Amino acid sequence: MKLGTAIAEIMKREGIEILCGYPVNHLIEHAANANIRPIMVRQERVGLHMADAISRVTSGRSIGAFCMQHGPGAENAMGGVAQCFGESVPVLVLPMGYARRISNIEPNFNSSQAMKAFAKSSEPINLATEVGNIFRRAFTKLKNGRGGPVIVEIPADMWNEEVPEPLNYAPVLRTRYGADPVHVKEAAALLVGAKRPLIYAGQGVHYAKAWPQLRRLAERLAIPVTTSLGGKSSFPETHPLSLGSGGLAVPRAVPKFLSEADLIFGVGCSFTETSFGIAMPKGKTIIHSTLDPAHLNKDVEARIGLVGDAGLVLDALLEEIGKTVASDRNASAVVAEIAALHEEWLAKWMPKLKSNDAPLNPYRVLWDLQHTVDIKNTIITHDAGSPRDQLSPFWRPVEPLSYIGWGKTTQLGYGLGLAMGAKLAKPDKLCINVWGDAAIGFTGMDFETAVRERIPIMSILLNNFSMAIELKVMPISTEKYRSTDISGDYAAMARAFGGYGERVTKPEDIVPAIKRGIQKTQEGVPVLLEFITSKETEVSRPGT
C-alpha cells in the first residue's frame, strides 16, 4: 500500500477520528478515504489548538492530530506546537516536508529539526518500510508519561513509496507507573500530622482521571484544595473544601490559605514558575507528586517526591493513610473559615458582578453567563489577558474537564480553537470561549471554520474597543497616538460568515441574549455574542 494509506490506517487503528489541517498535505485525502474526518481551518495555529482540546477533554484517550503543508504551513504552525509543549498536551503533528534530497539545505524549513526544541519527540519518515516503527514510537510517547506534541514529518517525495502488506501495526500500550512505597509512607505521615495542609492540584489529575481519589483525600483529612488553571475543574469548586483556582487572578481564600499552610501537597502539577500561576510561598514543606521526575526541584524545593501517575499516587496515599485515619476528619472549622473568606471576597466584588452600568461591566456579563448556562453540561475556556483574569476566579465548575484552563504561555486567540476542538470531542456539551477584542483580531477569521465545519460553539466577546490592560503601561502612546485603540463590529462579522451574531449593550439584555445563543447552538448554528463593555482593569489579585 502507499505510504499515505498506511499512515491513515495506523491513525485509524489508534482511534483517531478527526484530522485538523490545512492543505496541501496529501494525508488529508488519505485520511478522508479512511473515514477520518478532515477539519480545514483558516490558519494553522487554530488547527493545532483544536487538536489540543480534543486531547485535553478526553484525558488524552483520543489523541488530537494536525497536518499541514511543508514550508510556510509548517512555519505558521510553530506557535500552536509551542503552546502544546508549554501546556504538556499530547498532540500528533504531521507536517509535510521538503523532498529528502533538499530537506537539509537552507533556507528550506525542516520541521523535524526546527520543532525539536519544543516537542516531546521529532522524527522524519525517510524509509516507507519504517513507517510502523516510527508511529509505534510516536504513539508510545503520546500515550505514556507527561504529554507533549510529537512530530512526524513526511517528506514530499515519499507519497508514492510502498509499504509492505499486510501492514504490521497494532495500537501501542498505555501504561502507568507509581511512586516509591517508602516515599508514599513518609508523605502519608506528613499529611496526617500536618496542622494546616493544603492540596494544589494540576492538570495531571485530569489525565489520570484521578478526580474521585483527589476528593477522597481532601475529605478524609479535611484538607482545603486549590488548583492550577490547567487543573481547574479537577475538584468541584462548589465543594466546601474548595478554595477556588489560581492564576494571575485568584479568590481571596487561595493566597490566605497558602500563606498559612505548614504543608503543601502538589499533585499532578509541575510547580512551574509563571506569571499566570500561583506563586508558592517560601519556607513551606512541599510534597511533590508529578509524572515527570524532571519537574522535581525545578522551581520549588520538594521535601518528598512522588513520581508517578496521579491516580496511582493518590490510591497509594489513601491506602497508607487509611491505616491510621479510618474515617473522615471533622472539617467544620476549616469549612467555616473558607466560607467566611468566600463570602467576604464576593461581597467586595458584587458591585461589579451585578453592575447595571452601560457600557457593560465584563464581570456582570460573566456572572450572568455562569448563572444562565447549565454549568454541569458546559465546557468553557478563557482567552489570554483580561478574559482569563475576569473569568477564572469566579467561574465555579462542578464536573471534571468542564473548564479548559491554560497560562504557562498565553497566545491571544487560543480559546476559539479550544472551544471548537472541545465541541468536536464532546458534541453534547455547550462549548464556550470567552475572548476580548484583541484576541479576536488574531484568530477571528476561524469563526468561519466553525460555520463551515458545522461546529456550533458559543463565543462570548467582551469588546471594550481597547487593549485595556495595556493602558497602564502605554499611557504616552495612547494619549498621543491612540495606540491601544482597536475596534470592529464583530457580531456583524459572525453574521457575514453565516453564524448567529448579536451585539448587546444593556444589562437587562445580557441573559436573554445568552438564552438565544444557547438555543441557536442547539439548532447547530455557531454563535458570537458581542458585549460592549467598559475598560475594566481591576482583577482579583492577592490582597484584594
Image: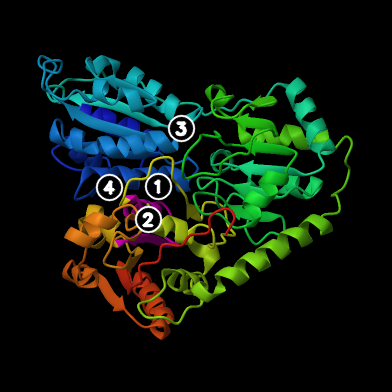
Residue 531 appears left or right of 492: right
Q: Compare marks 2 and 3 and give the one earlier in the sequence.
A: 3
Report, in whole angstroms, how far the alpha carbon at label 4 lies from the one at label 1: 11 Å
Amino acid found under the numbered disc labelled 3: Gly
For the point 38% across and 54% down, the residue is 383
Q: Which residue is mark 4?
A: 46
> Is residue 412 placed above or below 372 in the rendered structure?
above
Amino acid found under the numbered disc labelled 1: Ala
In the image, residue 64 lies at what x, y percent?
37, 41
Q: Compare marks 2 and 4 and give the one earlier in the sequence.
A: 4
* Figure coloring: rainbow
**Residue 70: quadrant of the picture:** top left
The reply to whether the C-beta atoms of the residues labelled 1 and 2 are less than 8 Å apart is: yes
Report, in whole angstroms, how far the alpha carbon at label 2 lies from the one at label 4: 11 Å
In the image, residue 285 lies at what x, y percent?
72, 32
Span highlighted in magenta in the image:
414-436
Which quadrant is home to the C terminus? bottom right
How packed mark 2 is, by other alpha carbons closer than 10 Å (few <14, some 14-19, many 20 or more), is many
In the image, residue 214 lies at what x, y percent?
68, 44
Q: Which residue is mark 2?
A: 419
Q: Compare marks 4 and 3 and give the one earlier in the sequence.
A: 4
Secondary structure beneath dot 3 equals: loop
Secondary structure beneath dot 2 equals: helix
Residue 61 appears left or right of 516: right
Amino acid found under the numbered disc labelled 4: Val
- What is the number of the mark on residue 53? 1
Q: Compare marks 1 and 2 and give the one earlier in the sequence.
A: 1
Tell whether position 419 is magenta.
yes
For the point 43% across and 55% down, the residue is 388
> Which residue occupies the foreground of this view, 509 or 356?
356
- What is the number of the mark on residue 81? none
Q: Which residue is mark 3?
A: 147
